[in-house]
Image: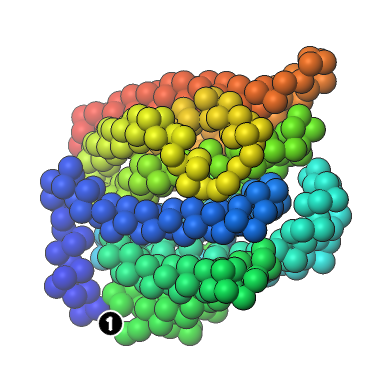
Amino acid sequence: MTSKLSLKDEKKRNLILEGNLWKILISLSIPLAIYEAFNYLYAFIDLWLVSGLDTNFVTSVIFIDEIRMAITAFGGSIASAGSVIVARDYAANKLKEASKNAGQVMISVLSVSLIVIGVMIVFAEPILRGFGANDYIIQSGLNYYIIQMATTGLVAFNAVFIGLEKAKGNTKIILFANLGVMIVKLILSYIWVMFLNGGLFELAISSMIAQGLLMMIGIYITMRKKNPISVSLNDFKPEFFLIKPILILAFPIFLGKFLFNMGKVFINGIALLYHNYVVAALGICSRIFGLFASVANVFHETEMTIISQNLGVNKPKRAIKTFYITILYALIVSTIGLIICYINLDWIIKLLGNFSDEQVEVIKTTYNFEQYSLVYSALISAMSGLFIGFKRTKVVFWINIIRVIILRLPVLFLMYTFIPERPYWHVGFVMFFSNTLTTIITIAMTIIFIRQENERIVLLKLQN
């Protein structure tokens, strides 16, 4: 044990490398699940506040948030790639290398984010119109869009901080830091909207303040001396030979996520042509089952940490076993969520806002198709976590491309072009169609990969 690695940190690392996988997956995932539950509550309350201002505002928020999600792919992908590399160094007790890589991840994500944010803000209105936003969305949401774009830089840095803590298996600190920040966000949002007559702009400002607070916490934790992979100012000096493998690993993740979310933005543009409330309905559907979706997807975050650390000490069989347990947990949680949300659908819709009868009909019709994405997304996330942990990020890129760019966007465009009736339920059907086929294809890719990996393990044993 090195002087930088505390007894507590070494014990946690040994559990990841030697302990009961069923227990370690749960113990590391519970803090993240609690965090995601509060994160869902924060998004739920935000939507409730927005619908309380004007139910038509929901369309603007959902439309702009899809663009924001696409932009956060820049920071998120670098954070994911960096955490995989850092986790392997950490497991192998290469703490100096882990600290160096952590610093390079941070400088990379900040540099890329600043460039992207500048472009998105300078060309704000043309970008919104290019994605299909109508005059109402631009008039009601332009300032909201600008603040949200600026906030993505803070979100990018925070994704790195969270990724580094996950790489060590330190999920409790993620929970406590984010809980405090989310409470600040909720209080600010509620006061601004309910007492000071604030609107979308003020909601965006409260998010920016909260993310800025989390960034300060992240800087302190990342650079403090007691951190086993403490990042010093020297670690922020750009070193291309370290940045290059991070970017190579991150690029397929980024491109897949970016095109996936951009595809959703273009789909929203087409959906607006079907019915002016379909985009809002899609967003509301994700809020209805969002709690269970967030918790189910938590397992793949823990999965990547455990797989990366075990591969760092050459334990591929244990890494594959981690995937089997992960996908089972994800399937159980998402299936339970599917049933609970279906039973309580009417109550949840009423809780979200005072929607008109027409709006409720659009929401329910869309939900009949979209609800299954709860299970499909949980399964796809678990399988993606396996590929990322094994540094097969190109596979994740193709999963995202298949899901939206190949199976969703062209199909919806063709249906809109060649089916003259254009009922709005077509949008929900296309979501169901693409999610189903993507899940089947991803399962096939996963089976092939595991079979190849097991053959490689046997071959290596024979050679030794």
Q: Residue at x 70, y 48 (%)?
A: 56
Judge whether residue 103 can be spotted in this image: no
Question: Circle 1: is it few (<14), some (14-19), or many (20+) Cα within 10 Å?
Answer: few
Q: Residue at x 31, y 33 (%)?
A: 336
Q: Is residue 411 above or below residue 221?
A: above
- Residue 36 in the image: state x and y as whole percent: 39, 54
Classify the position of the C terminus by image quarter: top left
- Residue 141 in the image: state x and y as whole percent: 74, 59
Q: Is residue 120 left or right of residue 84?
A: right
Q: Amino acid at mark 1?
A: Lys
- Residue 250 in the image: state x and y as whole percent: 54, 52
Classify the position of the N terminus by image quarter: bottom left
Q: Residue at x 55, y 48 (%)?
A: 353
Number of marks in the rendered image: 1
User: Residue under circle 1?
Assistant: 226
The quarter holding residue 358 reads top right
Judge whether residue 180 can be spotted in this image: yes
Depth check: 431 or 440 in front?
431
Q: Is residue 16 left or right of residue 51?
A: left
- Residue 317 in the image: state x and y as whole percent: 23, 37
